[in-house]
Image (spheres, rainbow, N blue to C red):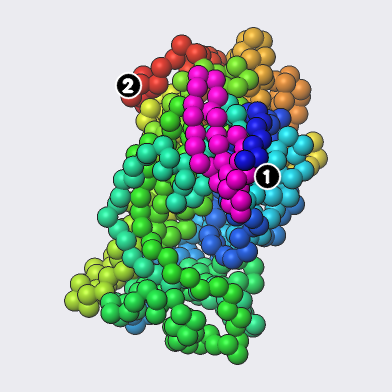
Amino acid sequence: MATQSSDVDCLVVGAGPVGLLSALLLGRAGWSVVIVERRPARYPRPRACTIDHEALRILQGAGVMARYADLFEPSRGDRGGYQLRNAQGELLRAINWNRTAESGWANTNGFHQPDLEAALEELVGALPTVHLSRGWTVTDLVESDARVDVRMVAIEDESRSRTVHARWVVAADGANSTVRDRLGIAGVDSGFEADWLVVDYRPIVDRPWDAFVTQYCDPVQPATAVKSGPGRRRFEFMRPAGMSVDELGRTETAWRLLARWGITAANAHLERHAVYTFRGRSASRWRVGRIFLAGDAAHLMPPFLGQGLCAGLRDAQALTWRLRLVQRGLAGSGVLDTYTPERSAHVQEIIGEAVAVGRIVCETDPVRAAIRDAAMKAELADPERLTVEPPHPRLGRPALTVPSDGADGRLSVQGRVAVGGRVGLFDDLVGGDWQLMGWEVDPAAVLRRTDLDWFAGLGGTVSTVSTVSAVSTVGDGRRPGAAVDVDGTYQRWFADHACQIVLSRPDFYVFGTGSVQRAAGLVSGLRALLSPSTSFRQDSVAS
């Protein structure tokens, strides 16, 4: 048996978007990373097809959007872009996917997953410390105090094996995670499950759609229509009672179901059709020592809100900034204890919302469907219920935040600013892993030099944003500059949160807010929470 071994900072299992992003974020920080993937080549077929503003900001920070922004098609359409309609085509509910989002990008976007994976793989391939190894599967993991020994074998020749000694392991190996199963981690089921046929096609001649996504709540045949990226469209059809999964998955079934919508072989190219079981589920644990679950390995959700991949990209961002701080000695290992509770509660809320929409869409009893339709149409008479917001979960507890009138643990903001004669998004022009920002006040003015230096060592920036050119310090906490709020984004955000300053984390969630006089307290509070002596018990960082 041929055996090889190697030592790395991190082993990432799975080369989907979550695994590739994790490797990219760590590799950009100089980490040595091996990505192991059982498939010998990238999977060429569509899967996830919607991505939100927060995920695009994450990709922006990883260098994706500067080169590949054209891969994403923003949501447009009447009544908020996301509609639920009954069998007669009457509007039942609209979700505002066209709203102005916090992160500087369109609230919701369509995309083709193989294109995103190709972009991520290209960026990963340019990093000298990251290696992608395809055609291997993990067979065993043994952890010691300082590392995890991961044994794997070649898919095509099990006589070939290798062992990777990694300080950390990120398991992003999908819904059927080998690592999760090896660790014996159980799943928590939502109780929702339904078989659906997913049909992806390329229209020969595209036609206008009323909405970016339409859920057809037809008890005879529930269906979904999605704009799935530039030049691509998707329909999804629930399996009717009495139809086998085998029949649902046939090509002739796909064309027959599409025909109702005027889609035929004469005006569309069928790209893929596959049967999926939509379900909501999450892992009971996301961490075992130095091994972490991320993406579908940690959670599954029905696709009715288009949040599955978004949640996985949030996992990658939330986990990697913690690992980077711990490895650099800038934080104690206790910060890793907040990964699971923060992310698990956040994703559980989204799963719950997605399951709730799924139960509406999947109703097949005509009497209950009629009652549902009447109740939802009655809600439309209330202007405040006409168009509802997508979910905006708060991080779970305990969290690495400080109490701030409910703003802590919520998503922070990014808008366009003007700096030094250039106009662009804040992260591109000012940036910073940790961002301490004041609205028409200068947080640096109340910070001691030692605090500024320590904060800069974290990769933090201190800035002022204003309606007019103002003093701003960026990078090392001392350089002068100016950040002008181009579109009023920051003025609205600070007014809505009744604060003068905000300290945002590397995953763009609010650490804390307050008046300018609280700036020193926020920085010292962060320093204390990153200390090796801090324990993140349920009651130790409550807010």
Q: Secondary structure at mark 1?
A: strand
Q: Position of residue 103 (x, y in %)?
A: 57, 45
Along the line of sight, the residue nearer the viewer: 122 or 530: 122
Please name the amino acid that badge 1 sits on. Answer: Leu
Q: Secondary structure at mark 2?
A: loop
Numbered circle sitting on residue 539: 2
User: Which residues are the magenta region?
Assistant: 137-163
Asked whether residue 447 is drawn in magenta, I would say no
Is disc 1 surrounded by few (<14), some (14 to 19) or many (20+) residues within 10 Å? some
| Residue found 47% across the figure and 85% down from its top | 252
Contact, mark 1 vs mark 2 (Cβ under 8 Å):
no
Asked whether residue 146 is drawn in magenta, I would say yes
Q: Position of residue 484 (x, y in %)?
A: 69, 38
- How far apart are the two marked residues, 1 and 2, measured between alpha carbons? 41 Å
Q: Position of residue 446 (x, y in %)?
A: 60, 14
**Is 113 on the left or on the right of 499, as rendered?**
right
Say if residue 386 shows up in the picture: no
Is disc 2 surrounded by few (<14), some (14 to 19) or many (20+) residues within 10 Å? few
Along the line of sight, the residue nearer the viewer: 354 or 194: 194
Numbered circle sitting on residue 132: 1
